[in-house]
Image (cartoon, grey):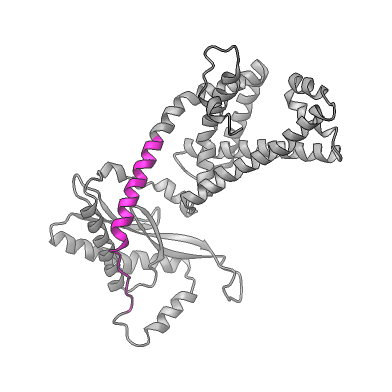
């Protein structure tokens, strides 16, 4: 396989009467691209929080090795039966109907019924999960990125996919379905190339940002002037899991007042700042906007989590707790601001603003539109849920 992969991949067979390139190479390329939009988004959604290395290992290498294992076991078993055991009729059976070729192989193996049942179950699972993931992503894209949509809407897209596939199969069989997939894949191939360039640029920008901030981040100091018993208050904050009303009161009270103070001070220094409350999406935001430059955004957002199993509580009345988490333009920072004193919040804003200025100083070539991510309200709601 490896000795012929380069020749097979790049050989256009211009002077050979063969349909290899059309039936296999180009078809598989088109088939893969046709699956890429919804499968890629679905896998990305369930892989949130993973590194690129973990994503590549889990999504590309593991299935590839499993595929090699599958072909090595079943493919070599069939070849051994044909070449060494005289089961040459399997060749014609495969050529006549590829769909039942595997079951014909099972007829010559022990536990034929068990293997056939397991195979049918795996095939059903494959089609159901593929259709489900495809319907989920199509539904989300058609709704502007919303993660939770009405049931009837998801049923509509799942049914529509099934009807389209059934019509293509009835009208022209498997060839019509394959042709439709390849046809739809061609324009998306251009989109994939553009997306690849965009991802490369995003990684370059992230590398600039990481390297410029790595040696410049300052540890946040809380409770410096709180007295000798501050550690007790801090310990209570670690073992307490606040409810929604408590965190909301903190966000729209103490935290809002702190951000407004920073905004006022920035304006006195001739830096245009804006403070906004978004109660619909339960967040507040301080932004520093400069024309022709990348904005600074400091956002405190209400987030819901399931109560940890280790929590000692007399009842299970409250199944969730809430956090006031910090989000910057590059994403969530995964730490909770709830319980911070006003001076602590202001200090954290200044630290992050200092990091932002340091990044802009060391990455002057990064254009604003290259990191502009918009507010992505609907996508943020999906992430929070």
Residue sitting nearer the eye, 25 or 269 = 25
Residue sitting nearer the eye, 218 or 271 = 218
Give how far across and how far down residue 185 sits, in percent. 50, 26
Q: Is residue 131 visible?
A: yes
Residue sitting nearer the eye, 385 or 182 = 182
Give how far across and how far down residue 22 sits, in percent. 57, 19
318 left or right of 357?
right
Q: What is the number of callouts on the image?
A: 0
Give how far across and how far down residue 128 sits, in percent. 66, 38
82 left or right of 382?
right
Up-down relation of residue 346 to residue 78 (above or below) = below
Magenta run includes residue 81: no
Up-down relation of residue 304 to residue 375 (above or below) = below
Location of the N terminus by quadrant is: top right
Magenta run includes residue 222: yes
Give how far across and how far down residue 197 sits, in percent. 37, 37
Q: Which residues are magenta?
A: 195-223
Instruction: State the residue at coordinates (36%, 65%).
Output: 251
Instruction: State the residue at coordinates (54%, 23%).
Output: 26
Q: Quadrant of residue 307?
A: bottom right
């Amino acid at each position: 396989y490896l000795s012929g992969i380069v020749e097979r991949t790049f050989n256009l067979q211009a002077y050979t009467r063969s349909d290899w390139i059309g039936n296999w190479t180009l078809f598989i390329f088109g088939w893969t691209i046709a699956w890429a939009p919804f499968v890629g988004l679905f896998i990305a959604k369930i892989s949130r929080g993973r590194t690129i290395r973990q994503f590549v290992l889990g999504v590309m290498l593991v299935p590839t090795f499993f595929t090699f294992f599958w072909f090595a076991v079943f493919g070599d078993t069939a070849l051994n039966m044909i070449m060494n055991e005289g089961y040459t009729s399997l060749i014609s059976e495969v050529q006549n109907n590829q769909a039942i070729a595997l079951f014909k192989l099972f007829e010559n193996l022990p536990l034929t019924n068990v293997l056939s049942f397991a195979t049918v179950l795996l095939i059903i699972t494959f089609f159901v999960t593929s259709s489900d993931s495809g319907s989920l992503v199509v539904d989300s894209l058609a709704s502007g990125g919303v993660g939770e949509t009405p049931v009837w809407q998801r049923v509509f897209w799942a049914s529509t996919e099934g009807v389209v596939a059934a019509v293509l199969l009835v009208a022209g069989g498997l060839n019509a379905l394959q042709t439709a997939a390849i046809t739809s894949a061609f324009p998306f191939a251009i989109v994939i190339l553009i997306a690849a360039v965009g991802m490369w640029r995003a990684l370059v920008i992230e590398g600039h940002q990481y390297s410029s901030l790595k040696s410049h981040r300052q540890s946040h100091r809380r409770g410096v002037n709180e007295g000798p018993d501050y550690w007790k208050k801090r310990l209570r904050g670690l073992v307490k899991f606040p409810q929604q009303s408590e965190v909301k009161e903190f966000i729209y009270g103490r935290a809002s007042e702190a951000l407004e103070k920073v905004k006022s001070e920035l304006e006195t220094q001739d830096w245009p700042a804006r403070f906004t409350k978004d109660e619909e999406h339960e967040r507040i935001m301080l932004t520093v906007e400069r024309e022709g430059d990348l904005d600074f955004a400091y956002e405190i957002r209400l987030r819901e989590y399931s109560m940890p199993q280790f929590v000692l509580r007399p009842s299970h009345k409250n199944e969730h707790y809430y956090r006031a988490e910090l989000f910057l333009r590059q994403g969530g920072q995964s730490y909770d601001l709830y319980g911070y004193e006003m001076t602590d919040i202001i200090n954290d804003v200044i630290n992050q603003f200092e990091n932002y200025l340091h990044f802009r100083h060391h990455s002057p070539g990064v254009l604003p539109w290259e990191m502009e991510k918009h507010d992505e309200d609907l996508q943020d709601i999906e992430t929070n849920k």
